[in-house]
Amino acid sequence: MGSDVDFVAYVCEQAGLGGALSYRKMFGEYALYLDERVVALVCDNMLFLKPTTAGRTLLDTVQEAPPYPGAKPHWRMDDVLDDGERLGRLLIATAAALPLPGPRAPKAAKSRAPRKR
């Protein structure tokens, strides 16, 4: 079951970070980006935050679960969704603790060799 884009939009609105928080569909689910970093995943209409030491200091308890089969455990944020201020602080702390993504490799040029018939 894929996530509903309305749920993803709700999560982004709750966080109150405006255009700084964005999302991108990936394999039927969504990744949340803050400052060019993937800070959370939305899978099956559940929010999963990337675990960081900075984020851990803002949480009382954490419930770990993989967002999809075979994934590393993330923190399920069911209890935080209705507290937009806390959610925003968690996303900001997580982004600050994560490294910027490395530069992308340039796409290889397509070969213009004639087709064999």
Image (spheres, rainbow, N blue to C red):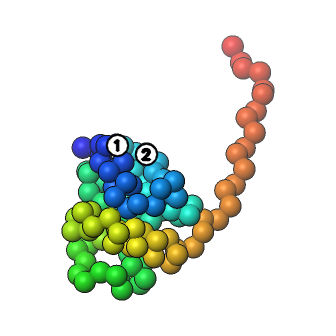
Residue sitting farthest toward the top: 117
Contact? badges 1 and 2 (CB < 8 Å): yes
- Indicate the position of residue 102 as horizontal and vertical percent values: 64, 65
Name above or below for residue 97 compared with residue 14. Answer: below
Q: Amino acid at mark 1?
A: Val
The picture quadrant where one finds residue 69 is bottom left
Tell me the quarter of the image containing the C terminus.
top right
The answer to which quarter of the image holds residue 76 is: bottom left
Which circle's residue, 1 or 2, is located before the other in the chain?
Answer: 1
Residue at coordinates 39% horizontally, 79% vertically from top-left? 55
Q: Nearer the viewer, residue 57 or 71?
A: 57
Q: Would you place residue 38 above or below residue 96 in this image?
A: above
The residue sitting at 60% across, 65% down in the picture is 101
Q: Secondary structure at mark 1?
A: helix
Q: Residue 9: x percent and y percent?
A: 36, 48
Q: Is residue 95 left or right of residue 107?
A: left
Task: Give residue 5's mark.
Answer: 1
Q: Nearer the viewer, residue 70 or 59?
A: 59
Query: At 45% from the left edge and 51% from the top edge, which residue is drawn?
Result: 23
Which residue corresponds to mark 2?
Answer: 25
Residue 98 at least partly seen: yes
The answer to whether any part of residue 50 appears in the image is no
Residue situated in front as seen by the camera: 12 or 78 = 12
